Image: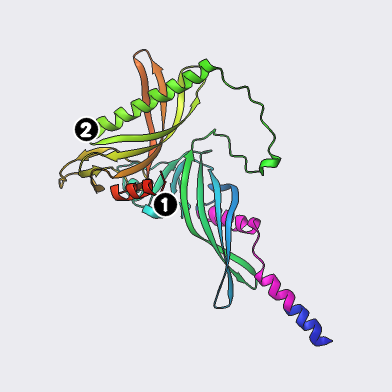
């Protein structure tokens, strides 16, 4: 009988060890890592499990959980999200904005520093890797990418199951209002395209842009967030003034010079880059005026990679 109870206990322990962790456990682990790394200047606002996979390595249970999340910044400052393609995997934070010409500003660019404002948010998508120990599951960030950023005042996404979200009975805008919004969006897109073309001396063109607008007060003034897919029309050197996830410019030269400011990216005709940013658009007597805000470099793809994406049905 004693051996029977021991067998039952062992079976229960084995089932417990094999049980997949709950999303709430992983969410709490990610929350603690973010708050600890940022000195509580970044908080985890939402967390959603999108997929999962149970693994066993050397007899030890492992679990990979895919997730999407939204973080919110608690102060004005710099989010050190990680350098280059690792942007999004780190959560160090410094309050205040470094002078771009100072050593702190230089380090900010090298380490993937993103200027942020209190109340602003960023959407992330990534993977948490976990290993089960006697004390429970232990998770660490394996992969994490910045999907988008939104300025302060943007309503948070509703992450409840669709059945729990009450139906919104908003009055649809009139045809005149819809036409006006479309005209404003087109004007902003056209001005953005001209700005990029002018700054690069026509070597870089706006391929396409996604534009979101929020009206400021009653005047014809809008807070704008955008993602711009730009294409290089000439072989040469892109003088971006920034690294991935840091503010960039659109200066271009066909021949690199020793006095050109770093970083310098060698590009070829047909290569693409995605830039995400914000600006303020205001209607003046002479037309629309764009006041450029922060922007950052999201990714770079060669002409061959772009062609492969199109052939595969991507964008």
**In terms of secondary structure, where does tag 2 sit?**
loop
Q: Is residue 73 left or right of residue 304?
A: right
**In terms of secondary structure, where does tag 1 sit?**
loop
Between 276 and 181, the residue placed more toward the observer is 181
- Residue 186 in the image, given as x and y percentages of width and height: 40, 24
Q: Earlier in the sequence, mark 2 or mark 1?
A: 1
The magenta span reads 11-37
Q: Which residue is mark 2?
A: 201
- Residue 91 in the image, given as x and y percentages of width and height: 48, 52
> Image quadrant of residue 194?
top left
Residue drawn 34% across the image and 14% down it: 286
Q: Which residue is mark 1?
A: 87
Q: Is residue 232 left or right of residue 153?
A: left
Q: Which quadrant would the C terminus be assigned to in this image?
A: top left
Residue 83 visible? no
The image's colouring method is rainbow
Q: Which quadrant would the N terminus be assigned to in this image?
A: bottom right
Between 225 and 205, the residue placed more toward the observer is 205
Residue drawn 64% across the image and 25% down it: 170
């Amino acid at each position: 009988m004693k051996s029977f109870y021991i067998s039952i206990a062992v079976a229960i322990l084995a089932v417990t060890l094999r049980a997949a962790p709950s999303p709430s456990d992983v969410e709490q682990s990610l929350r603690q890592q973010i708050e600890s790394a940022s000195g509580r200047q970044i908080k985890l606002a939402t967390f959603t499990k999108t997929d999962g996979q149970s693994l066993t390595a050397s007899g030890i249970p492992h679990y990979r959980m895919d997730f999407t999340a939204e973080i919110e910044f608690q102060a004005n400052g710099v989010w050190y999200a990680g350098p280059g393609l690792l942007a999004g995997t780190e959560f160090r934070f410094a309050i205040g904005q470094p002078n771009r010409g100072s050593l702190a500003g230089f380090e900010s660019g090298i380490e993937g520093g993103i200027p942020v404002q209190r109340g602003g948010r960023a959407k992330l998508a990534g993977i948490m890797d976990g290993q089960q120990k006697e004390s429970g599951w232990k998770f660490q960030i394996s992969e994490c990418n910045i999907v988008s950023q939104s300025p302060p005042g943007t309503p948070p996404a509703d992450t409840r199951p669709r059945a729990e979200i009450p139906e919104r009975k908003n009055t649809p805008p009139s045809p005149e209002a819809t036409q006006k919004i479309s005209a404003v969006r087109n004007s902003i897109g056209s001005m953005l395209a001209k700005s990029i073309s002018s700054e690069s001396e026509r070597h870089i063109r706006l391929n396409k842009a996604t534009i979101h607008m929020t009206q400021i007060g009653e005047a014809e003034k809008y807070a704008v967030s955008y993602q711009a897919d730009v294409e290089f029309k000439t072989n040469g050197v892109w003088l971006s003034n920034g690294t991935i996830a840091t503010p960039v410019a659109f200066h271009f030269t066909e021949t690199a010079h020793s006095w050109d400011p770093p970083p310098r990216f060698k590009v070829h005709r047909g290569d693409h880059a995605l830039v995400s940013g914000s600006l303020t658009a205001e209607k003046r007597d002479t037309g629309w005026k764009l006041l450029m805000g922060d922007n950052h470099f999201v990714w770079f793809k060669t002409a061959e990679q772009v062609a492969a994406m199109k052939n595969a049905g991507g964008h």
